[in-house]
Amino acid sequence: MSVIAVRQIIPASLSAYALARLRFWGAEAAFVVFTVQIMLPLEVIVVFLIFQRRILNNFLESAFKG
């Protein structure tokens, strides 16, 4: 798979994810997701999503420990 294809697939995936979460986030949050996606380089968005997932997992593990 070429680099160009990857650079097109990942933003499309992020857009699809934002649309799928629209009913949970609300229209304003979805607009912010699209705006940030346009302004930031793809690498920054991917790194942010990775760290966001790790932080959320750590929080949930610590919050629900006995």
Image (tube, rainbow, N blue to C red):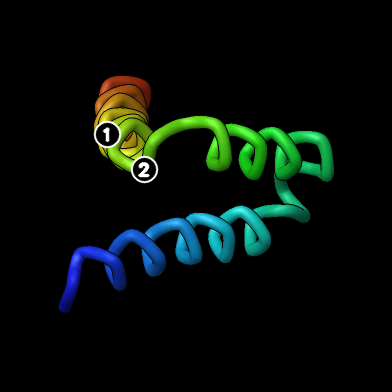
Q: Nearer the viewer, residue 64 or 39?
A: 39
Side of 54 where 8 appears, left or right: right
Q: Is residue 54 above or below residue 15?
A: above
Residue count near mark 2 (Cα–Cα under 10 Å), binned few <14, some 14–19, many ≥20: some
The amino acid type, in three-letter code, at marker 2 is: Leu
Q: Amino acid at mark 1?
A: Val
Label 2, on which residue?
42
Query: Is 62 above or below relative to 47?
Result: above
Q: Residue visible at 18% across and 73% down?
A: 2
Q: In which quadrant is the C terminus drawn?
A: top left
Q: Which residue is mark 1?
A: 47
Near-viewer residue (60 or 21): 21
- Number of the front mark, 2 or 1: 2
Q: Image point 67% across, 60% down: which residue? A: 19
The secondary element bearing badge 1 is classed as: helix
For label 1, count other residues whose C-alpha is less than 10 Å away and answer few (under 14), some (14-19) or many (20+): few
Q: Is residue 51 visible?
A: yes
Query: At which x and y percent is residue 47?
Result: 27, 34
